Amino acid sequence: MNRESARTRIESLRTTLIRHNRRYYQWDDPEIADADYDLLLRELTELETEFPDLIAPDSPTQRVGAPPLEKFGTVTHRTPMLSLANAFSDEEIREFDRRCRRFLESDDPIRYVVEPKLDGLAVNLLYESGRLTVGSTRGDGAVGEDITLNLRTIPAIPLFIPRPEDRAGTPGDGMAAVPERIEVRGEVCMEREAFRNLNRRRTEQGEPPFANPRNAAAGSLRQLDSRITARRPLTLFCYAIGTAEGVSFRTHGEVLRALATWGFHVNPLIRPAVEIEECIEYYHHIGQIREELPYEIDGIVIKVNDLALQEHLGAVSRSPRWAVACKFAAIREQTVIEGIIVQVGRTGVLTPVAVMKPVRVGGVMVSRATLHNDDEIRKKDIRIGDTVMIRRAGDVIPEVVEVVRTARTGAEKPFIMPETCPECGSRIVRMEGEVARRCIGIACPAQIREHIAHFASRGALDIEGLGDKMVTQLVTAGLIHDPADLFFLTMEQLLGLERMAEKSASNLLAAIARAKNPPLDRLIFALGIRHVGEHTAKRLAQAHGALDALMTATAEELQTVRDIGPEVAAAVAGFFREPANLQVIEKLRGAGVTPRQTARSQAAPFTGKTFVFTGTLARMDRSEAQALVESLGGAVGSSVTKTTDYVVAGEAAGSKIEKARQAGIAILDEAAFFALTEIRTG
Ligand code: IVH
């Protein structure tokens, strides 16, 4: 394609992608499938790789992050970012309203806007002539940190405010001109589901999970390497503006409407309220639906709607008089640890668990909390008999936040990790570089139980009626020793179990039989290979298409699969070299378990990958090498950019090497490059 047609195509792709972005993030109403979106984005990426000088900073491709910073710079907010005074009860909310009216010397009811109070991180986005120029944290309210590169990677943050003529056909058609300069404020959050998936992936990869979505969002935003932020599922809800030049508004409601028109994500639960009692109703209503929301909130915010009244009310000690945060009761409670038990997991890992006096936390009765490992117990100095604060973050297992030291009587007992497995008496070992201790007993009933329960669980073979209790009963009765045994269970055996009626026995057998043709990725996940969670299992299934192909892959080959690093690759290859595991797989096959083949997602193994060559290759010339990459579905770029995946360095390689090194892009020598093409083709 020549430059001119590339330019036209790039522009049209950008417009289309930006429109789809807005439909997706703002209206929640996507027009095309994710896969089709990805295709368009890939086409744009490839064109930009070919013509790097046509890359614009606000292109939808520029959300992948940039090379790491040494440290963050600082930003002085044009208008300070205030914080909010708190109210904790209906009466305190009424008091806020009375204060406002006293100050305004008015008896008329005040019109308010009520909003969920999101539990994330406040950020300030400065747009100049419609372009996002600086993004920062709140900091101390006057000066924050410059996290522009990180914020640019968040898909819900518009990189520019579209001009009215570019908004034709959207719900904001014709409204709100682009301001000269505007500070847009909002909260960066991570939705609960995204948080759960991120933690699952981290655990799979041996990284510590985040305690709650807020910490995950904060940790992701404070990365010096924005490429890490780019991989974290963050979103933004906007709720205010700071300095605004070239636009004026009369009410807060107008501000929110303009923000929505410009492509910002505004919370759909925001409502006008004509007087304070309506705000109180909203406070109760949101309190009730709080747990069902896809993101975490810690209260509501009530704001005076009229901006002239806001101005008049002003601020005291860095909080505006015109707004108040009404907090919900904290999802933190106090209770007593009555004992500490040790649970043995599927991989033999021992987890100490606190058994506590039952307590209601955020509407749910809780009597157990994970203590993670003995290092954690030591760090927090948790003892049996201690009074502790516990917390439940979203749907995460409750955990002990801290010990209430002042409640200590001296009768509390320190906890000592057992030296042998509490289930099977085998030795406990601590692997090098791991905090966890493991039971090494191969016949440990706890491990067998957990292993089979995992095999039958939701994300795995999803066998109805085969929960933890049933599995324990079957293992204890000696009817099953490994997952394959499930498929050989008989009616007679089941009826021999306590409290097992004919109806439930036949239901269970039917459910087991139905699980014989699982999708390949679920079967891979079900096998319980270390480090292989649902996400990794999907990648493996996509890359290999069939179980046999996966079983024979070498660790080296496995590493070429997207998202799979050396540790996971070694775990997978190791799993399939283990005679005991192969036996179980044979037995599964013998029972008629045959996974559904997964269509290989990538017909060509280099699809989506961009190579840049530098120096001369001994084995073939540049154009042949380029043809080879393209024949495998990859693209070749002429210079190193953010979208480059590999730089191939031949003899007398040039400055591109240095650039790649700085950007953290993989550099292959000739041998490594050809090895990669052979693995990919072979
Ligand atoms: S308005 C002057 N609205 O709460 C008013 N803040 O304690 C400035 N927050 O730093 C904030 N949801 O991080 C506002 N709907 C909302 C909010 C909200 C969450 C956070 C924000 C702010 C803190 C104030």
Image (tube, grey):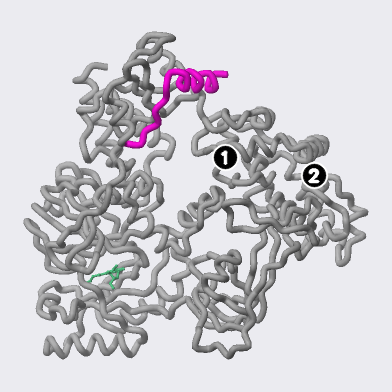
Quadrant of image for the C terminus: top right
Q: Bounds of the magenta span?
A: 663-682
- The foreground one among 430 and 462 is 430
Q: What is the C-alpha distance between the residues marked 1 and 2? A: 22 Å
Q: Which quadrant of the figure has residue 529? A: top right
**Residue occupying image coordinates x 30% and y 50%:** 150
Q: Is residue 349 visible?
A: yes
Q: Is residue 644 magenta?
A: no
- If you read the primary sequence from the N terminus, does the residue marked by circle 1 or circle 2 appear first? 2
Coordinates of residue 314 in the picture (x, y in percent): 13, 78
Any atom of ligand 1 within 8 Å of the CB at mark 1? no
- In the rendered image, the residue lying farthest to the left is 246
Between 233 and 666, the residue placed more toward the observer is 666
Q: Judging from the image, what secondary structure is the residue with disc 1 in?
A: helix
Answer whether residue 679 is magenta in the image. Answer: yes
Crowd class of label 1 (few under 14; some 14 to 19; many from 20; radius 10 Å): many
Circle 1/circle 2 CB separation < 8 Å = no
Task: Pick whichever, 622 or 409, lies toward us.
Answer: 409
The residue to which callout 2 is attached is 484
The kind of secondary structure the magenta stretch mainly shows is helix
Looking at the picture, which amino acid does disc 2 mark?
A: Ala
Instruction: Name the amino acid, label 1.
Output: Lys
Q: Which residue is mark 1?
A: 538
Compared with 632, 77 (above or below) is below
Horizontal side of 310 relative to 229 (left or right) equals: left
Indicate whether 579 appears above or below 173.
Answer: above
**Quarter of the rendered image showing ligand 1:** bottom left
- How many neighbours does mark 2 have within 10 angstroms: few (below 14), some (14-19), or many (20 or more)? many
Q: Quadrant of residue 33?
A: top left
Give residue 610's position: percent from left, percent from top: 37, 26
Horizontal side of residue 456 vs 356, given as left or right: right
